[in-house]
Amino acid sequence: MRTFRDLEVYKKSFRLHIEIHELSMTFPKFEMYELGSQIRRSSNSVPANIDEGYNNQHTNIYLEGLNRAVGEAQETQHHLDAARVKGYLDQSNFDELDTSYTECIKMLFGLRIALLKKHR
């Protein structure tokens, strides 16, 4: 791997951020700076935190970035729940996005385990 862009979890989380951004732009106008802004920021933070720690000389800093990425993915799932309940997202789209974020979280845990094994 040459750059963070080669990581499958980065690619997946970045695509999800773009999808979430487009979805949030369909929310009612009064939600644009409430739920819309929150879901855009949390979904953007997932790939940003993966990138931030990549190639760092200190494995612990990279691990912390991955932990933050997991937290942001879970926050995005919360915002997806709210969007579904408020009627801004149908069940089918919710299920697809929620499943994709769960997959990202699993991938992040896998990357974390690989880093810990390499660090030993």
Image (cartoon, rainbow, N blue to C red):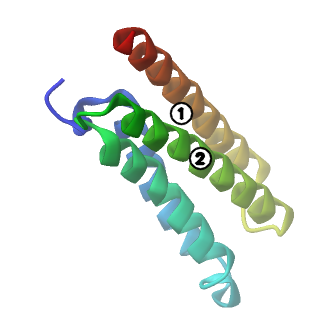
Q: Which residue is mark 2?
A: 73
> Is residue 110 placed above or below 102 in the rendered structure?
above
Q: Is residue 39 above or below residue 112?
A: below
85 relative to 7 in the view: left or right: right
> Which of 17/96 is in front?
17
Q: Residue at coordinates 54% horizontally, 75% vertically from top-left?
A: 25
On residue 4, which mark appears? none
Residue 100 in percent (x, y) is at 58, 36
Q: Amino acid at mark 2?
A: Ala
Name which quarter of the figure residue 58 lies in. top left
- Disc 1 target residue: 104
For disc 2, the neighbor class at 10 Å (few under 14, some 14 to 19, many from 20) is many
Helix, strand or loop for disc 2: helix
Q: Residue at x 39, y 9 (%)?
A: 120
Q: Are marks 1 and 2 in contact (CB under 8 Å)?
A: yes
Q: Residue furthest bottom?
A: 30
Question: Which percent across, then down, holds residue 9?
Answer: 41, 32
Q: Amino acid at mark 1?
A: Cys
Q: Rounded to the nearest whole Å, what is the CA distance between mark 1 and mark 2?
A: 8 Å
Lateral position of residue 33 relative to residue 18, left or right = right
Q: Residue at x 64, y 33 (%)?
A: 102
Image quadrant for the N terminus?
top left
| Front residue (pair 117, 71) | 117
For this rendering, which residue is in front, 36 or 71?
71
- 52 over 100 or under it: above or below: below
Q: Earlier in the sequence, mark 1 or mark 2?
A: 2
Figure label count: 2
Q: Along the horizontal axis of the image, is 3 left or right of 71? A: left
Q: Residue furthest right?
A: 85
- Disc 1 on helix, strand or loop? helix
Residue 74 appears in the rendering: yes
Residue at the extreme left: 2
